[in-house]
Image (cartoon, coloured by chain):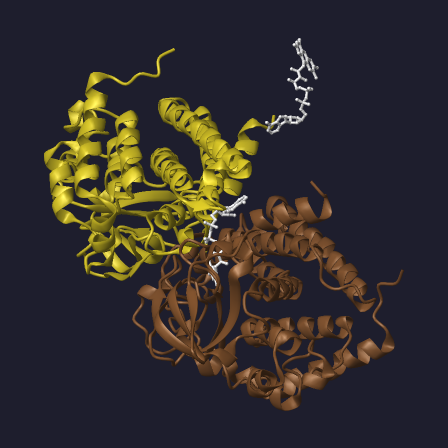
């Protein structure tokens, strides 16, 4: 047992840190406080990493991966969290990319992998439907074969950042008569500019626009966009979900969040002393840090297992549940810490294009919206109830 | 033992509940909070006409009730998420005047509050004061028979709609001394008063209120100079009990909505309400609600007892209800899945209001500390 990083790993950390210091664009997200991040903002770092060959570190080297060990990838994640970088979106890099290089044919690999690596092509995930959330296999969107094409009809929902997407990967029903609902589903790549696709915004409780409804009316897609075999989409979808979950613990980002919380609590005063010196509040911060350490070591144990050749299994459910609970508690404590100035709605101030909040301390103005928004983390990516069901079945064997 | 309400109190409940149900459905509320003014003055006038704005006052002040009536009204406000300034104007400012005001002040201002012609906001919190009511940087300097007020009050709820403020200021002593706090009535259009108005994350309106050499006459002082803290503490406790009642009303609707949704929403071919983990969570939500109702009653009943008893029970209620508000709000969103995250469904608005109530008039931690201080030895 050894928790220390090796000399090579330390050298790697130094290299990574220097690269981020020298190359991360400083102006990302520095416009007015009301702005959603633009497509350019969200892709800027991705594009820089693409040129460096670091945008898809976990991919096999033959497809442009780095060959980094899981520990190196972990260090990479930590260093990015330190600088709070805007990381490449998971939909291309962590989800559809691995599906394409694992199950796609040579043409598909040649067509799609370069754009994912470079950050030129934006992907979205068309899984969920109004009637199919936790029970994804009950999805109804159809793809009917017509000559060399599929014709898609149906409605997807909760499609994250589809408003910017160039391509989407969709689960569609190709065999309505299959004996089990999981068996008649196909995994199809769709150019979002195809006629018949309409993307409609959904406003969330924090006031932001990050998800959409996607309506598909007689959308004609070349049959060559099918991944793998027809009616085998569920297998690919499940493969992808395991990949999605492994990044979701968010340890490094939460560590940074704890540091920020401590800074806030050091500045807020209570009875003439910094809030952080209050036993009650300090206890809550420590509890969070302790739980975060437990999660971190658990994740490192999982990584070590992966390094030894064990793929991501049901442990990823544990990481997701614990990781999201910590992320949510962090936002609760931040809202508590800021006191009265958590209440104003910063979106109600006229946008003068500056990043200064006209009242209260700067750190206060996102506290409530972030708290509201982060409730999503225990819902998406397979809700925490569903993750517990998975642990019950797959690990406990109940 | 008697937990029944009088006929008169039941009439108050019926009246306010009908009004809110008929005139404050969720779509109406959405329109109201998005409108320029952000509230419904016409509803306020109707409330005045129905006598609701008089409900917490004694007969000699032109009213007919007290804290129980305020509780009943706020519970119904909570059910409809009404944004009108009943707590700031009637409970806070009205409370300061009824407990501390001279007969002339009571006649003028309580009369104005009851008729709806005057709308008050309660300017007591400061940017760096957190929940400490005595921590005041705002000063009121005696100047002959007058006072000159300077300072900045934070997140003054309802201030954009106000005609008047009740303001706390330091007339002597150091920044956090218990002595030296005084309370004043200041007209919003007084020379030197300015505001910066904004919306709040839970759909209300508030302002930063700035006082720059605002001169008020000696009659503006409510109660005794330098001894305003006990008055303010009492008023804030009454407001805390009222916001607890609002939370109870909001929790009730949140629980009902969640239960309804769990019966209708199907996944895996069955209503999600058939999953035991959700059933148990909703059972917990119900228990949290019932405990909250009890604590809300307790706090309201104890408001007129001695200071220590009042404070202890109000803090106990706010702790319990703050915790319940968080549990119920979060559980409701989780049970609604993605739909709970949308602006479209009412449940998100209840969650947001409950989340902000947690910190209003003191967070769980603040009231826990006060409870410890009052009960430990
Ligand atoms: C912000 C956000 C972004 C998203 N992004 C995407 C995206 O990009 N692409 C995409 O395809 N989808 C996306 N989703 C959808 C997400 O995956 C679903 O919301 C999620 O799977 C839950 O489904 P649902 O919302 O229909 O909730 P439901 O399935 O209706 O669940 C409601 C409640 O019931 C519980 N429940 C359901 N079944 C069970 C059971 N068997 N046992 C116990 N409890 C159960 C759930 O845990 C939840 O608490 C996103 C969602 C959100 C909120
Ligand atoms: C100190 C003590 C005093 C007692 N005194 C008396 C007495 O005076 N007279 C008398 O008749 N009995 C008495 N009992 C017995 C008591 O009523 C039983 O222990 C109780 O009903 C639980 O039954 P069980 O022990 O068989 O547990 P089980 O029924 O086997 O339950 C085991 C676990 O499974 C859970 N479980 C079972 N069914 C469900 C379900 N449908 N959904 C979710 N969870 C479930 C239970 O909650 C429990 O956690 C006593 C027990 C104790 C410990």
Chain identifier for the brown-coloured part of the image: A
Assign the N terminus of chain B to one quadrant of the image.
top left
Residue A26 vs residue B166, the one in the foreground:
A26
Q: Residue at x 52, y 84 (%)?
A: A44
Chain corresponding to yellow in the figure: B
In this picture, residue A255 sits left or right of residue B55? right
Q: Position of residue A202 (x, y in %)?
A: 36, 63
Reply above or below: B353 against B246: below
Whole-percent x, y for residue A93 in the image:
60, 76
B223 is higher (above) or lower (below) than A72? above
Residue occupying the far top of the picture: B1
Q: Relative to A299, does residue B374 appear above or below in the rendering?
A: above
Q: Residue furthest bottom?
A: A51
Residue A207 seen in render: yes
Quadrant of res A69:
bottom right
- Quadrant of the rendered image containing residue B109: top left
Front-most of residues B263 and B259: B263
In the image, residue B23 sits, relative to residue A33, either above or below, namely above
Q: Could you tell me which residue is drawn at 66 percent across and 75 percent down?
A: A102
The extreme right residue here reads A1
Quarter holding the C terminus of chain B is top right
Image quadrant where residue B185 sits:
top left
> Horizontal and vertical percent for residue A205?
38, 57
Out of B250 and B298, give the one closest to the viewer. Answer: B250
Residue in front for this viewpoint, A137 or B357:
A137
Circle count? 0
User: What percent of the width, then of the height, locates residue B373?
Assistant: 56, 33
Regarding residue A26, the answer to whether it shows in the image is: no
């Amino acid at each position: 047992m050894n928790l220390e990083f090796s000399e090579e790993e330390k050298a790697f950390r130094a290299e990574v840190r220097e690269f981020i210091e020298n190359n991360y664009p400083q102006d990302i997200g520095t416009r007015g406080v009301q702005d959603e991040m633009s497509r350019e903002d969200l892709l800027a770092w991705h594009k820089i990493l693409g040129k460096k060959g670091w945008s898809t570190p976990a991919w096999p080297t033959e497809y442009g991966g780095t060959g980094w060990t899981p520990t190196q990838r972990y260090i990479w994640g930590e260093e990015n969290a330190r600088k709070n970088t805007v990381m490449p979106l998971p939909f291309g890099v962590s989800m559809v990319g691995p599906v394409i290089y694992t199950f796609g044919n040579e043409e598909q690999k040649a067509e799609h992998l370069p754009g994912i690596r470079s950050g030129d092509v934006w992907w979205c995930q068309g899984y969920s439907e109004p009637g199919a959330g936790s029970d994804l296999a009950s999805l109804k969107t159809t793809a009917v074969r017509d000559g060399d094409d599929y014709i898609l009809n149906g409605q997807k929902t909760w499609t994250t950042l589809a408003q910017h997407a160039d391509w989407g990967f969709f689960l569609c029903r190709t065999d309505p008569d299959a004996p089990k609902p999981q068996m008649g589903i196909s995994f199809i790549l769709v150019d979002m500019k195809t006629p018949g696709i309409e993307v409609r915004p959904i406003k969330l409780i924090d006031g932001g626009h990050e998800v959409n409804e996607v309506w598909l009316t007689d959308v004609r897609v070349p049959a060559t966009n099918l991944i793998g075999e027809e009616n085998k989409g569920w297998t690919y979808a499940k493969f992808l979900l395991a990949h999605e979950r492994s990044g979701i613990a968010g340890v490094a980002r939460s560590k940074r969040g704890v540091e920020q919380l401590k800074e806030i609590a050091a500045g807020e005063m209570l009875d003439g002393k910094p809030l952080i010196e209050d036993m009650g509040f300090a206890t809550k911060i420590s509890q969070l840090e302790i739980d975060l350490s437990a999660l971190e070591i658990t994740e490192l144990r999982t990584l070590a297992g992966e390094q030894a050749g064990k793929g991501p299994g049901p442990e990823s459910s544990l990481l997701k549940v614990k990781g999201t609970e910590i992320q949510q508690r962090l936002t609760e404590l931040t809202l508590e810490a800021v006191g009265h100035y958590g209440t104003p709605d910063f979106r109600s101030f006229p946008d003068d294009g500056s990043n200064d909040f006209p009242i209260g301390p700067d750190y206060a103005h996102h506290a409530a919206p972030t708290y509201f928004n982060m409730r999503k983390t225990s819902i998406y990516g397979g809700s925490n109830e569903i993750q517990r069901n998975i642990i019950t079945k797959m690990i406990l064997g109940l | 033992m008697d937990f029944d309400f009088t006929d008169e109190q039941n009439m108050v409940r019926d009246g306010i509940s009908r009004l809110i149900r008929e005139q404050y459905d969720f779509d109406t509320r959405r329109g109201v909070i998005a409108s320029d003014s952000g509230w419904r003055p016409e509803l306020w006038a109707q409330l005045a006409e129905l006598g609701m704005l008089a409900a917490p006052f004694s007969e000699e002040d032109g009213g007919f009730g007290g804290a129980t009536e305020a509780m009943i009204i706020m519970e119904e406000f909570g059910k409809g998420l009404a944004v009108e300034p009943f707590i700031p104007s009637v409970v806070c400012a009205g409370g300061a005047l009824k407990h501390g005001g001279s007969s002339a002040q009571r006649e003028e201002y309580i009369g104005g509050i009851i008729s709806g012609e005057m709308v008050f906001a309660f300017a007591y919190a400061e940017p760096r004061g957190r929940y400490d009511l005595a921590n005041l940087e705002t000063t009121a300097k005696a100047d002959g028979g007058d006072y000159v007020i300077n300072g900045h009050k934070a997140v003054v709820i309802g201030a954009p709609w106000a005609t008047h403020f009740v303001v706390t200021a330091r007339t002597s002593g150091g920044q956090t001394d218990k002595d030296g706090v005084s309370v004043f009535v200041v007209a919003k259009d007084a020379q030197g008063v300015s505001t910066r108005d904004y919306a709040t994350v839970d759909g209300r309106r508030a302002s930063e209120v700035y006082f720059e050499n605002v001169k008020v006459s000696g009659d503006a002082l409510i109660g005794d100079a330098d001894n305003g803290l006990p008055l303010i503490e009492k008023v804030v406790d009454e407001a805390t009990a009222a916001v607890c009642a609002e939370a109870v009303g909001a929790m009730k609707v949140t629980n009902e909505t969640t239960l309804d949704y769990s019966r209708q929403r199907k996944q895996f071919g069955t209503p999600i309400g058939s999953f035991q983990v959700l059933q148990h969570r909703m059972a917990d939500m119900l228990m949290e609600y019932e405990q909250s109702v009890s604590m809300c009653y307790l706090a309201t009943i104890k408001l007129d007892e001695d200071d220590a008893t009042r404070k202890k029970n109000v803090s106990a209620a706010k702790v319990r209800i703050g915790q319940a508000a968080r549990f119920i709000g979060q559980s409701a969103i989780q049970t609604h899945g993605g739909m709970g995250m949308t602006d479209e469904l009412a449940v998100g608005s209840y969650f947001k209001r409950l989340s902000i109530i947690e910190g209003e008039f003191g967070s769980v931690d603040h009231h826990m500390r006060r409870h410890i201080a009052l009960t430990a030895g």
